Image (cartoon, rainbow, N blue to C red):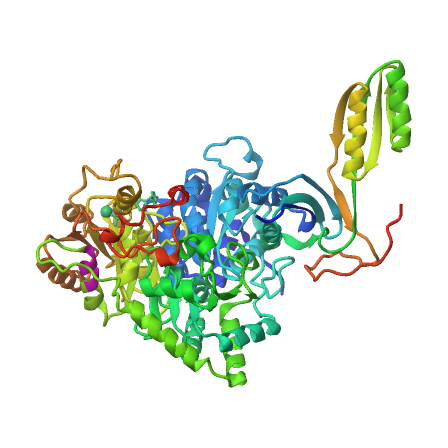
Amino acid sequence: MSTIERHTIAVLVDNEPGVLARVIGLFSGRGYNIESLTVAEVDAATHQSRITVVTTGTPMVIEQIKAQLARLVPVHGVHDLTAEGPCIERELALVKVRNVGQERVEALRIADIFRARAVDSTIESFVFEISGATEKLNAFIGLMADLGEVEVSRTGVVAIARGATVGSPMGGREPVKRSSKPIR
Amino acid sequence: MSAQTMTGAEIILKALVDQGVEVIFGYPGGAVLPIYDALFKQNALRHILVRQEGGAVHSAEGYARSTGKVGVVLVTSGPGATNAVTGLTDALMDSIPVVCLTGQVPTHLIGNDAFQEADTTGITRPCTKHNYLVKDVKDLARVMHEAFYVARSGRPGPVVVDLPKDVQFASGPYIGPTELAHKSYRPQTKADSQRIQEAVELMARAKRPLFYCGGGVINSGPDASKKLTELIRLTGFPCTLTLMGLGVLPASDPLFLGMVGMHGTYESNMAMHDCDVMINIGARFDDRVTGRLAAFSPGSKKIHVDIDPSSINKNVRVDVPIVGDCASVIADLTRAWKARKGKADERGLQSWWKQIDGWRRRDCLRYEKTTKVIKPQYALDRLQTLTRSRETFITTEVGQHQMWAAQFMKFEKPNRWMTSGGLGTMGYGLPAAIGVQIAHPDALVIDVAGEASILMNIQEMSTAVQYQLPVKIFILNNQWMGMVRQWQELIHGGRYSQSYTESLPDFVKLAEAFGAVGLRAEKAGDVDGVIEEMIRVKRTVIVDVCVDQTENCFPMIPAGAAHNEMLLGPADKAEKPTSEEGMVLV
Ligand SMILES: Cc1ncc(C[n+]2csc(CCOP(=O)(O)OP(=O)(O)O)c2C)c(N)n1
Ligand SMILES: [Mg+2]
């Protein structure tokens, strides 16, 4: 059995009606997984949107997913950010936690450690804004859930390759080597 | 050049004419009345009025497949569009270029559950190559031309253009077809030369090579088949063809091993299993061809030529992937093969052919010769013999008769064989034959049919008669859904659940009721006579050939089995029961 891999794929599309349905329909119709999917217009002049999709599958399935995406008529390019070298992945979450007393103090302290910002507050609740890698968000939300009732809204992953190469428009080129160091 | 202004309906027709369209297959309704009104006022486009929209799409497919042109369909909103869905899916599966124009409720009513509203672009998104909803008449001309480009280029397929009624009435600018490259859609047609070299190296070193070619070669144009035939003859390699590829290499060529796959020939399937280099050109390793994947051609290096990168490494891992248009890749391969001057491994090839000849001697398509009851294979054998010298086009329905037709009808040229391969759509053959006959008025066009399938689009008899199309419907009438019965016999313990048709029409009287000619053959001795009569009569004809009700289609690779586990005849079946894995497969 082949191993299941997790890949982050960037898809540049024409921002036309139905394009998101095409991409999502492809995943559901062919039984591929979507762990997260984000989309927004990134170039107002040419009306192009960038979809970042995190998916899992065997190497053969991942290859199929990319080929199937590239086949859609309004798709300009497909980049497998996981396969093509180091990339940065970020997610943003708004986390509402409802609690009082000592647990409220603890929540603030943990938020500080995670560099989450309180963006709303009542005497019995906070809304924290936090961004970072998916795992960091998971850890933070887990801790908050221990400290009270929580409500969560997350964006899903957005990602971009490290290094000086500007990948847009993304022409489905060969993977490029990138040498810049991650900044922590 | 300043753009001309005209109504949406006029823009649509002008775009069709400028795209070289001569015929459209359609059915009117409220949401396309402006287009029908514009049609009324012109003579450049011929409209063929079908009897059900599903028939229109299959007719367009038959037209497209037999000419290489784009087939065009015009239907109304709602039920018109939903009736077209089967045909669109069929065209998608078999890569047939079709542009289907659908009416839509006016833009301000979209989303309101208006009368005869359906979310056509939503419904057809997964069953088209691409689709459009035109909300502004300013976009209409561009979208029309783009639809044709998308339908015919790259891997061809169906494209829907959904046309709200207000857009058909509105006035807007007309622009002609442009050479402008599409923003994002640019199929790769020219192969990577490195890959060509790798392929030729493999071919030259092969001891047991095999060409395995399919419908992609036909889609690439008649020239591709010609060039491929040259290449195959140059190498002296054996060649097998898929159901969709029949006609790519002349059936009479000694290098042709017959069809491959579930009901392919013994020699083809054994060669697939045992070859050491497989050269797949324009085929897609479909499950009907591969059998059990884990046991598929275990010892071969595989070269795969396909214009669609997503076809490569989908089911079967290949060693040399070549993305490109068949005609161009075949030319490159031929050039590289000639330049290399090296020949094939002659010794290896010789003993390979010896092995193949051994398989051929099994004579896997042999059938019992009978004097009374008509064996379906005999009927087709005679049909083949008596039509050989004519310009003949064959379409089929789906079932045993389809497989027998693939085995017994011999195609010397591409574009002569229209069958529903990928989707297996019963009801395809008659409307497809109508489309073929419209394109080739003087040819002999025969739908090889089953009595069950033909009833799925029998209403198109009325179309055939209206346009005086001399299509021949050659029914192999076994009173059973034969293919279903065969599977029930092999896999479900002979429990023939709902596969017998208790009540069938009298097909001779039915033909007459439609204003066509009906003929019947009841014993082997009648067969030649009805075929000759059918050819002689220059009218629509139904031939009811009453065949052996119990005959099964062999050879057969049972579901879940490998190529070298074929059943050659009824006696074989007891020895090799279907695996549990195979039971769940279709
Ligand atoms: C629209 C559709 N419905 C159901 C099937 C499943 N099916 C495949 S073959 C077959 C029987 C066809 O019977 P007939 O046309 O008499 O052909 P025969 O096999 O007897 O030659 C059926 C029901 C299908 N292929 N298409
Ligand atoms: Mg039948």
Q: Which residues are magenta?
A: B376-381
Query: Which corner quadrant of the image does residue B496 belong to?
Result: top left
Name the main secondary structure of what is drawn in magenta.
helix
Pick the front one: B414 or A2: A2
Relative to B16, is B382 on the left or the right? left
Q: Is B110 placed above or below B337 here?
A: above
Query: In the rendered view of the protein, which quadrant contains the C terminus of chain B?
Result: top left
Query: In the rendered view of the protein, which quadrant contains the N terminus of chain B?
Result: bottom right
Q: Position of residue B81 (x, y in %)?
A: 44, 42
Relative to A102, is B436 on the left or the right? left
**Residue B230 falls within the magenta-colored stretch:** no
Extreme bottom residue here? B341
Relative to B279, is A117 on the left or the right? right
Extreme front residue here? B575
Pick the front one: A33 or A25: A33
Q: Position of residue B395 (x, y in %)?
A: 31, 58
Tell me which residue sits at (22%, 44%) in the image: B480
